[in-house]
Image (cartoon, rainbow, N blue to C red):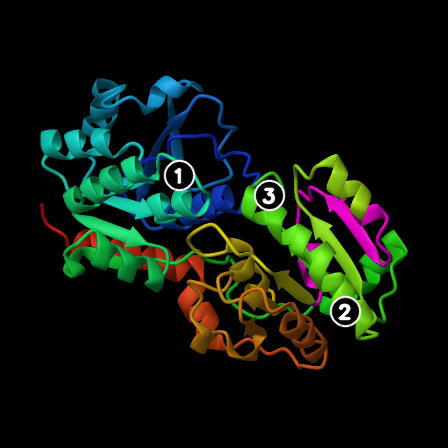
Amino acid sequence: MSSNINILSIVPYRVLPATSGGHLGIVDLHHHLGKLCNDHIISTENNDDESRYSFRIHRIFPNAVKRYLPYYKLGAIKKIAQENNIQYIYCDHPYMALTAIALSKSLGKPWFMRSHNIESDRFRTMGKPWWRIMHWFEKYTMRKANGVLLITPEDKAWALEHYKLDEQKCYVIPYGTTLSITPSTHNEAKLALSTEMGIDASVPWLYFLGALNYAPNVEAVEYILNEIIPGLNAKGFKYQLLIAGKGLSEELQHKISATENARYMGFIPVLDTFLNACDIMLNPVMTGGGIKTKAVEALGYNKIVVSSKIGAAGLIPKVCGNNLQTTTDYDWDAFTSKIVEASTIQTNIPDSFYNTYNWDKIAANILAIMQRTKV
């Protein structure tokens, strides 16, 4: 850790323990950023202990909606910033941006906004009536930031076109993976999980993983059960389907139980063995914004990802090699054909994937951006 670089990061909700891909991405990024500098995170009082990570959490926000009020706890945040000689201010999402703007003006320090999605467009595609308000607010805050860290090239292009941002202050900072080389324990993991769960290890294991109380993921599970599985069965393809994640409705759980060669795994707190064991990730996601974090995770584990075009948005195909297979949205016959084809592909994720998506490299890039930015 470098003791002469100090960052104040605003993360306005509980991320420890991390119970979703989005939360895990925040924790991983700040952990790797904290290896390079002193990262002070302003967050909520209900976060778990962070002693195993390289950042420090200051628990000054209550677990209540009032924390999102403009300038809430600004005095306390400013005091922490002054006591720790803060040089850069980092804000996850636009929701606390007014506080970050005020802090930046008061201290004379640059501030950066990390955009996990284009929130207004995500709300629009999900049919949320307040998306126009978010459009105005998000545009305002991005224009005020000294640097905007966008998660995909598509988000950057969208923001430049619709929010008329200065391209010189916009950067693509993707969701990452802790892996830096291809894992080599697939066969061992598959055999171990096969023995534990009584699943046939000789067939390809297909999987879907995500927060299953999130509408785009629920839709994806319904597409898998209603469109993809019947298509695979009609092709005579042999497989095992595993669906994992928290929050799946009882109705869909019963439907999975009634589906041959399908199993609901529930929430899996430690994913390493599961991800090593599986073969092909299904990603028929059609709504929601930003990058699909589980696709990055799957590629890091050298899995084949069969995805809709929308589901693959934000991924950089040239660094994914043959591990990323995409089809036209809603073309389920093409999707199932890609799955059958994927079962014959020898997976070999390129080294360029890790050079692009490894968290250590991403954190170093963020710090370099901060250090060359002036107020």
User: Which x, y percent locates residue 242?
Assistant: 75, 55
Q: Give the CA separation, mark 2 to mark 1.
A: 46 Å
**Front: mark 2 or 3:** 2
Residue 349 visible to an observer of this rendering: yes
Give whichever of 124, 3 is nearer the camera.
Answer: 124
Q: Is residue 45 above or below residue 343?
A: above
User: Which x, y percent locates residue 96?
Assistant: 29, 32
Residue 138 located left or right of residue 53? left
Pick the quarter of the image with the C terminus.
Answer: top left
Say which amino acid is labelled 3.
Ala
Judging by the rendered image, the residue that carries numbered circle 2 is 232
Residue 224, located in which quarter of the rendered image?
bottom right
Q: Which residue is pictured at 53% across the width and 47% down the height? A: 21
Q: Secondary structure at mark 2?
A: helix
Q: Earlier in the sequence, mark 2 or mark 3?
A: 3
Q: Is residue 363 above or below residue 337?
A: above
Q: Are marks 2 and 1 in contact (CB under 8 Å)?
A: no
Judging by the rendered image, the residue that carries numbered circle 3 is 211
Give whichever of 49, 212 is nearer the camera.
Answer: 212
Residue 90, located in which quarter of the rendered image?
top left
User: Which x, y percent locates residue 2?
Assistant: 29, 48
Return the mark for residue 55: 1
Crowd band around label 2 with a 10 angstrom C-alpha radius: few (<14), some (14–19), many (20+): some
Q: Which residue is pictured at 52% across the width and 28% down the height? A: 48
Q: Secondary structure at mark 1?
A: loop
Q: Earlier in the sequence, mark 2 or mark 1?
A: 1
Q: Earlier in the sequence, mark 1 or mark 3?
A: 1
Give whichever of 313, 145 is nearer the camera.
Answer: 313
* The stretch drawn in magenta includes residue 42: no
Say which amino acid is labelled 2.
Leu
User: Which x, y percent locates residue 28?
Assistant: 46, 48
